[in-house]
Amino acid sequence: MQTLFIPDIIRLEITGKTGDPFRQENILVGIKTFATHKNDIDISPFLSDKEGGITITKEQLSHRADIFISYGLMDYVSLIYAKPGIQIYFWGNNRLDHCISYWSSLLNHKKNRKQTEMEIKLLKRFEKDFAEIEKRETEELEIYSSCSNRNTTQKEDIILVSDIWDKPCAEKIYKVILPI
């Protein structure tokens, strides 16, 4: 069985329909990995720089995957058990709307909810950890809300890259066309 090998560095060079560089900051993309068993993992957010380029390190990708898995929302396993096929995609507004609604609701619920005595004791014990998680969640909500994807009329995600990461690799460079 083949397994996923994450490159040390992944670079996306985004161009427009004409082939000219798409110099837009804060274009949000995600990477989808496919599970051999259990559930697929969507890893994000990754944002473009002022030149429209995106650089993702193996450490960043692994860290984002660990965060995703840590929520325990479904049954996931580590990336080392994923199939070698991946997709890199532009987040459409439908996905952004869903994500923003979910995180806004979750963060509001945390602020407005009454806590049991047991929860209060646990919160005190893990106060610093919970504060860091809430800070990260709030920052991510801001990323999803303010990314340049929100300024487009693109409703559906756009798959920019489909590839196979089936052997160790120092760097993957993708020149992608963003047809918006």
Image: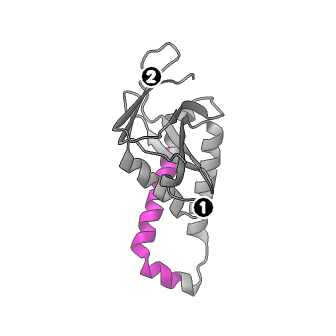
- Which circle marks residue 106 in the picture? 1
**Residue shown at 47% from the left, 63% from the top:** 134
For numbered disc 1, what is the local secondary structure?
Answer: helix
Label 2 to label 1: alpha-carbon separation: 34 Å
| In front of the other: 80 or 71 | 80
Report the span colored magenta: 120-143
Q: Nearer the viewer, mark 2 or mark 1?
A: 2
Q: Amino acid at mark 1?
A: Leu
User: Measured from the top left, where is residue 54 in percent x and y?
Assistant: 40, 34
* Magenta segment includes 122: yes
**Residue shown at 53% from the left, 16% from the top:** 17
Query: Label 2, on which residue?
Result: 22
| In front of the other: 60 or 166 | 166
- Which circle marks residue 68 in the picture? none
**Number of numbered labels in the structure image:** 2
**Can residue 138 be spotted in the picture?**
no
User: Measured from the top left, where is residue 48 in percent x and y?
Assistant: 42, 34
Quadrant housing residue 10: top left
Query: Which SS does the magenta portion mostly show?
Result: helix
Q: Are marks 2 and 1 in contact (CB under 8 Å)?
A: no
Task: For the C terminus, give its image quadrant.
Answer: top right
For numbered disc 2, what is the local secondary structure?
Answer: loop
Q: Earlier in the sequence, mark 2 or mark 1?
A: 2
